[in-house]
Amino acid sequence: MQVKLITIGNSKGIRIPKPILQQVGWEDSAELEVRGDSIILRPSRPPRAGWEDAFRKHPPAPLSEEEQAWLEVEEDDLWKQDETW
């Protein structure tokens, strides 16, 4: 599809028809990337989108005894008031 560049202040832009925006699921923002002589636009996704499904498919390995011990340490045990540096 050929589109016309329009002037927007000191910049140029294009109008993207609503059906196309709906087809790709764009809402308020997009990711823009320049690759060679091409401009690539893709829908923005929230940070960590899809992580929950990925963790469900590939759960993390069980913690080692040492890692588990660190999780169980109380903050007071790490920084005792009577210690001097």
Image (cartoon, helix red, strand yellow):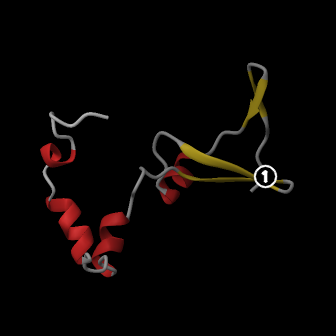
Q: Quadrant of the C terminus?
A: top left
11 is higher (above) or lower (below) than 29: above
The location of residue 40, given as percent across then percent down, is: 70, 54
**Residue that sits furthest to the right in the current view:** 37
The location of residue 51, given as percent across then percent down, is: 36, 64
Q: Quadrant of the N terminus?
A: bottom right
Residue at disc 1, secondary structure: loop
Residue located 25% across and 79% down the image: 62
Residue on which disc 1 sits: 2
What amino acid is found at the position of numbered circle 1 in the picture? Gln
The location of residue 25, given as percent across then percent down, is: 46, 55
Residue located 79% across and 40% down the image: 4
Residue located 34% across and 80% down the image: 58
66 is higher (above) or lower (below) than 25: below
Badge 1 crowding class, 10 Å Cα cut-off, few under 14, some 14 to 19, many 20 or more, is: few
Q: Is residue 78 left or right of residue 61?
A: left
Residue located 86% across and 54% down the image: 37
